[in-house]
Amino acid sequence: MKQGAIRLGLVLFPAVAVTASLFVGRYPVGLQEVIGALLPLDGVSPTARVLILDVRLPRALGAALVGASLALSGAVFQGIFRNPLVDSRILGVSSGAAFGAALALLLGIPWYLVDAFAFGFGLLAVFLVVLVARRFGNSVLVLVISGILVGSLFSAFLGMIKYVADPLDVLPAITFWLLGSLSGTRWDAVEKLLVVCVMGAGTLLLLRWRLNLLTLDEREAAALGVNATRLRTRVILVGTLLVASAVSQAGMIGWIGLITPHAARALTGPDHSRVLPASMLMGAGFLVLLDLLSRTLMRSEIPLGILTGIVGVPAFLLLFMRHLARGGGWR
Amino acid sequence: MKLSAHGVSYAYRPGVPVLQRISLELGAGKVYFLLGPNGSGKTTLLECLCGLRAPQEGRISLGDRDLYVLPPMERARAIAYVPQIHRPVFGYRVLEVVLMGRAPHLGLLSTPGRRDLAIAFAALDAVGLSKLADHVYTELSGGEMRLVLIARGLAQEPRFLLLDEPDAHLDPKHQHGILELVRGLAAEGLSPVLTTHNPNNALLYADSVAILRRGLLVAQGPRDEVLTPRNISIAYGMEFELIGGNQGLKAFVPVQGRSSRSDFGVN
């Protein structure tokens, strides 16, 4: 009964958030206009129709997909690295993507290719990490260390680009991109996000029970007949695709991937069969809500990456306090 | 089916062998103890026998097949490994931990079904922890954790159950509870293999014993032939005496302990 209520709430959360974001904004629209635009009926002004169908709806769905991708990848990374404090940054994918986007902006490459650069360099970073780790025995520790090294290297390159970038136009563009935003998300972006999210989530959900075995000590997993290295490498690649797709569309958005899986585990327990769907739904709902706030709190939009940080830190503190109050043991 | 080592040598670093030319044969529903002091190589030997480490020399065979060419899933259906206590990062429920033992019977994309659940419950029942099925594993006591890991091994439905020091870090009651349980499993046809550094536990619960010292076999065979004061004294590098004999009750006692006690009395 209680589980049923939790499930219902998890499904309703992103649905309610997306619906709410159709109504809220600078230009107020009423129930009649939203229903009229969605169905579609006559009697809705063209402005309202465009605003609802081509601005607010794709943006909300984009936020939901980015949130779901980040939360899902965070959940699997925390599981396979056996560490509840990691998210996509652990493997350098975010640093790689940030460098890629900055490089594209520096070279004056057309704006629609900036996302492709971010995506490509995000994958390249993780590819390097996996390559280095393979050279040194592929344990979790080696993966984490190579992730930190590759991430730091790309951060240094990013610093170099910022240093040489024109401070009047290119540097602000890079900075703004890095802060993360979903403004300007249209249907084509939603389609791209959806394809990667469905493929990634599909693969990971099929592997959901096996993922539990990756949280075991490597020798124990091996004794159970599990080829942990091979499975982990595959899961890392899928998780990286999800992160790279999210980052290339929305820029650097931290904390969702770190906190959401904790909140999900608190509700469902640590079994990945339940944590993965719960993380996706919560991540989707959270990011839609935060994006809603980012475009309504102030006269101008607050960059999403800043808002997730401001909300994320206290949320994490709350979860951590709860953890301490229960006497330790991550759940 | 037999699990046997033929002239197995293992070294973590070249030139520093941890195991040297070990040959043994396990199976036939007997409780087999690997006995030896710290650093004698018994845990390494156990890990070789599980297929977790490939020996540099010699080979280990399961039936007539080489253990290291066997597909891992097939190996894990024959041999279960019960590690010493571990504390996983995530607080799985006890039943979920036991269900992980079904991994070698399930395909890459499948999840445990009704039959797997029944087997996991039966395994929990066999170790007497049915009541804790819904508890959080990380919140259990050391003895209970070890029992859960044994249940996970049983859920693998193996022929061999290899336990790494199942009596370490436990009070006497829990030690004997676990060893008693292991003996019961052997009566049902499973072949348990245990490492320990306590000769008296081997005396009470073993059918066969191999004694290791610095990577070499000191002796192996039926319990009563192997567990002699001489072998135990050689293995541990200190003098032991076998006392008792009344109603079959015996124990190894270090000579040193008794002599120092009498010294204490004089001073």
Image: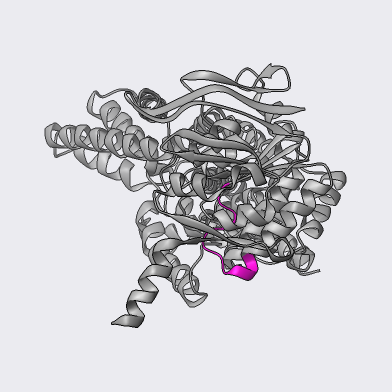
Question: Is residue B226 shown above or below B74?
Answer: below
What's drawn in magenta, residue-wise?
A: B164-174
Where does residue B172 sit, x and y in percent of width and height? 60, 68
- SS assignment for the magenta stretch, majority: loop
Visible in this render: residue B174? yes
**Residue at image location 61% in from the left, 57% down from the top:** B201
**Residue at image location 82% in from the left, 50% down from the top:** B117
- Which quarter of the rendered picture does the N terminus of chain A lie within? bottom right
Where does residue A150 sit, x and y in percent of width and height? 29, 33
Question: Is residue A307 shown above or below B66?
Answer: below
Q: Is residue B48 left or right of residue B147?
A: left
Q: Is residue A110 left or right of residue A190?
A: left
Of the pair A158 and B70, the residue shown nearer to us: B70
Where does residue B46 sit, x and y in percent of width and height? 56, 38
Magenta stretch contains residue B172: yes
Visible in this render: residue A274? no
Of the pair B107 and A26, the residue shown nearer to us: B107
